[in-house]
Image (tube, rainbow, N blue to C red):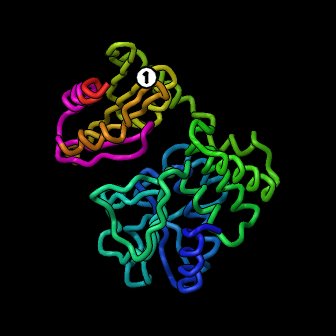
Amino acid sequence: MNELGDKFLSFLSANRNRRMAIVSHMNADVDALSSIYALHSVFPNSEMAIEDRMDVPGKMFADRIGISPRKLSSLKKEDYDGLIVVDTSAPQLVKSAEGWPILLIIDHHRENDHMLKAGLVLRNSSAAATAEMIAEILPEIKPEVAFALACGIVSDSARFKGGHLSTFKMLVSLMEKCGKDYPEILQYGEPEPTSELKELVLKSVKKMRITRHGNYLIATVKVREHESYVASALSEFADAVFVARWKRADGETKISARARKSVPVPINEVMMQLGNEFHGAGGGHAKAAGSSAKAKPEIVLKRCVEILSGRL
Ligand SMILES: [Mn+2]
């Protein structure tokens, strides 16, 4: 057990029976939900929660393991001792956490200047998934929890586009614990998209703009929903992808960005700069990141391409 594991074990023994809510980032994905589910298994009085909704694979996964977390905003703070936040440290991605005492954060995203404060922060930005971190620190893992964490690792590593020897070893150990084979884990770690989603991606291909910068192909497109899914799908071919969704109610554009191995610039840095320039916020991982920006999609997408091209 490593240093993070020791810290977690003392947190666990001091807080095991407290009434805590466990939540993650908006649009909860499989990594976020498997992390919530796994932590809930060792804090018997805790309540699983989500910020707003689950993404499409996240919802399929939640149905498979039989959970339906309530919105954090629907819980009464007074009824709880505090909050655990997993798979994010960004205040703008867990707006309902405002006013809650945050006792613990477990996250694999990189540190930046605008982060939630907590009594204890366990961070490992080299972990492929928050699920991998949690699998390492839990004192005991039941078979159904092992299955959930395996799905989280496969999902967030994008079927091992990222990951270290320790990630593979952990997956093997979780597979042994849950007795499930890889295809069954993959079914939830990377679920078959609905035909609506497939159609959305194919229509995006028709609408997208391609900018060539040297040998790099940069794709941009505006969608009404599922920007993250479309970005992942288009990055099967484009070197870099920026997908925009206009949020009328907030007067802002959400950007989901992806980069292939070929791109030497960390795409989360592009998203951070974009957020700063347009009074929003950006961050994420080197190959998958996102941002919000207070401007119309056309303007924001143009700027995404300029910032990335300027650094290539
Ligand atoms: Mn994650």
Can the viewer see residue 46 in this picture? yes
Q: How many residues crowd mark 1 within 10 Å: few (<14), some (14–19), many (20+)? A: some
Residue 111 versus residue 293 in the image, above or below:
below
Q: Quadrant of the C terminus?
A: top left
Q: Is residue 209 left or right of residue 204?
A: left
The residue shown at (75%, 50%) is 172
Does the segment drawn in magenta span residue 286?
yes
Question: Residue 18 at what x, y percent from top left?
Answer: 52, 85
Question: Residue 232 at what x, y percent from top left?
Answer: 48, 32
- Where residue 118 sits, quadrant-wise, is bottom left
Query: What secondary structure is found at the residue carrying circle 1?
Result: loop
Q: Could you say which is closer to the camera, residue 57 or residue 82? A: 82
Give the labeled residue for mark 1: 239
Q: Is residue 41 left or right of residue 4?
A: right
Residue 274 versus residue 88 in the image, above or below:
above
Q: Is residue 256 left or right of residue 21?
A: left
What residue span does the magenta drawing correspond to?
277-306
Q: Residue furthest front?
A: 3
- Disc tally is 1
- Where residue 115 sits, quadrant-wise, is bottom left
- Where residue 192 sits, quadrant-wise, is top right
Q: Quadrant of the N terminus?
A: bottom right
Q: Could you say which is closer to the camera, residue 212 or residue 233? A: 212
The residue shown at (38%, 17%) is 217
Name the amino acid, label 1.
Asp
Question: Residue 210 at what x, y percent from top left?
Answer: 34, 15
Question: Residue 261 at what x, y percent from top left?
Answer: 49, 28
Residue 120 versus residue 277 in the image, above or below:
below
The residue shown at (24%, 25%) is 310
